[in-house]
Image (spheres, rainbow, N blue to C red):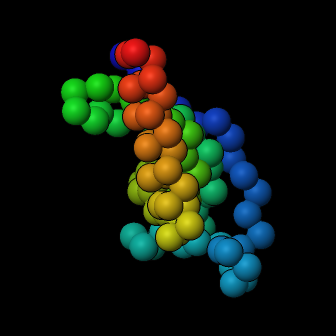
Amino acid sequence: MFEDRPLDIVSSQGLEGRGGGMKCPCGHGPMELRKQIKTTTFRGVELHYEAESYVCPVCGLEVATVEQATAIQQAIIDAINGFEKSKR
Protein backbone atom coordinates (compact mmCIF):
# COMPACT_ATOMS: atom_id res chain seq x y z
CA MET A 1 0.00 0.00 0.00
CA PHE A 2 1.21 3.51 -0.79
CA GLU A 3 1.89 5.63 2.29
CA ASP A 4 2.30 9.38 2.63
CA ARG A 5 6.01 10.09 2.53
CA PRO A 6 8.12 13.22 2.88
CA LEU A 7 9.94 14.51 -0.18
CA ASP A 8 12.04 17.06 1.68
CA ILE A 9 12.11 19.68 4.37
CA VAL A 10 12.00 23.18 2.91
CA SER A 11 13.91 25.92 4.69
CA SER A 12 11.46 28.39 6.14
CA GLN A 13 12.45 31.97 6.81
CA GLY A 14 9.04 32.65 8.22
CA LEU A 15 5.39 32.26 7.50
CA GLU A 16 4.55 33.96 4.21
CA GLY A 17 6.85 36.90 4.95
CA ARG A 18 5.32 37.74 8.30
CA GLY A 19 8.42 36.81 10.30
CA GLY A 20 8.79 33.83 12.62
CA GLY A 21 7.88 30.30 11.62
CA MET A 22 4.64 28.44 12.11
CA LYS A 23 4.37 27.09 15.65
CA CYS A 24 2.54 23.93 16.71
CA PRO A 25 -0.80 24.84 18.31
CA CYS A 26 -0.21 21.97 20.77
CA GLY A 27 2.76 23.86 22.21
CA HIS A 28 5.56 21.73 20.72
CA GLY A 29 7.40 24.70 19.20
CA PRO A 30 8.40 25.40 15.60
CA MET A 31 6.94 23.35 12.77
CA GLU A 32 8.87 22.20 9.69
CA LEU A 33 7.81 23.18 6.18
CA ARG A 34 7.66 19.89 4.23
CA LYS A 35 6.86 18.75 0.72
CA GLN A 36 5.24 15.32 0.77
CA ILE A 37 3.57 12.81 -1.51
CA LYS A 38 0.08 12.39 -0.09
CA THR A 39 -2.68 9.87 -0.78
CA THR A 40 -6.44 10.39 -0.80
CA THR A 41 -9.41 8.41 -2.07
CA PHE A 42 -11.94 10.07 -4.36
CA ARG A 43 -14.96 8.12 -5.64
CA GLY A 44 -13.22 4.86 -4.80
CA VAL A 45 -9.99 5.78 -6.62
CA GLU A 46 -6.72 6.15 -4.72
CA LEU A 47 -4.94 9.33 -5.85
CA HIS A 48 -1.39 10.48 -5.14
CA TYR A 49 -0.38 14.14 -5.17
CA GLU A 50 2.36 16.46 -3.93
CA ALA A 51 1.56 18.75 -1.00
CA GLU A 52 3.47 21.36 0.96
CA SER A 53 2.48 22.08 4.56
CA TYR A 54 3.88 22.72 8.00
CA VAL A 55 4.40 19.58 10.12
CA CYS A 56 5.14 19.36 13.85
CA PRO A 57 8.17 17.09 14.29
CA VAL A 58 6.86 16.07 17.74
CA CYS A 59 3.16 15.22 17.24
CA GLY A 60 2.94 15.10 13.43
CA LEU A 61 0.14 17.67 13.21
CA GLU A 62 -0.06 19.14 9.69
CA VAL A 63 -1.13 22.75 9.09
CA ALA A 64 -1.49 24.53 5.74
CA THR A 65 -1.77 28.20 4.94
CA VAL A 66 -4.62 29.36 2.72
CA GLU A 67 -2.21 29.43 -0.23
CA GLN A 68 -0.93 25.91 0.53
CA ALA A 69 -4.50 24.59 0.92
CA THR A 70 -5.39 26.09 -2.47
CA ALA A 71 -2.37 24.39 -4.05
CA ILE A 72 -3.28 21.07 -2.38
CA GLN A 73 -6.85 21.27 -3.72
CA GLN A 74 -5.51 22.02 -7.21
CA ALA A 75 -3.09 19.07 -6.99
CA ILE A 76 -6.00 16.76 -6.10
CA ILE A 77 -8.05 18.12 -9.02
CA ASP A 78 -5.08 17.57 -11.35
CA ALA A 79 -4.70 13.98 -10.05
CA ILE A 80 -8.42 13.34 -10.67
CA ASN A 81 -8.18 14.78 -14.19
CA GLY A 82 -5.08 12.67 -14.89
CA PHE A 83 -6.92 9.55 -13.76
CA GLU A 84 -9.96 10.39 -15.90
CA LYS A 85 -7.76 10.88 -18.99
CA SER A 86 -5.98 7.56 -18.39
CA LYS A 87 -9.34 5.72 -18.39
CA ARG A 88 -10.16 6.84 -21.94
Q: In this view, which residue lies farthest toward the left?
A: 44
User: In the depicted view, which residue is nearer to us: 70 or 29?
Assistant: 70
Q: Quadrant of residue 13?
A: bottom right
Q: Residue at x 69, y 47 (%)?
A: 9
Q: Residue at x 45, y 23 (%)?
A: 85
Residue 42: give x, y in percent of width and height: 28, 35
Could you tell me which quadrant the N terminus lies in? Answer: top left
Above or below, 65 against 79 in this view is: below
Residue 73: give x, y in percent of width and height: 44, 52
Left or right side of 70 for 8: right
Q: In this view, which residue lies farthest toward the bottom?
A: 18
Q: Residue at x 73, y 79 (%)?
A: 17
Left or right side of 58 for 10: right
User: In the depicted view, which residue is nearer to us: 19 or 50?
Assistant: 50
Above or below, 82 against 63 in this view is: above
Left or right side of 66 for 41: left
Question: Can residue 26 be seen from the camera position used here?
Answer: yes
Could you tell me which quadrant the C terminus lies in? Answer: top left
Q: Quadrant of residue 67?
A: bottom right
Above or below, 23 against 46 in this view is: below
User: In the depicted view, which residue is nearer to us: 76 or 62?
Assistant: 76
Residue 10: give x, y in percent of width and height: 72, 52
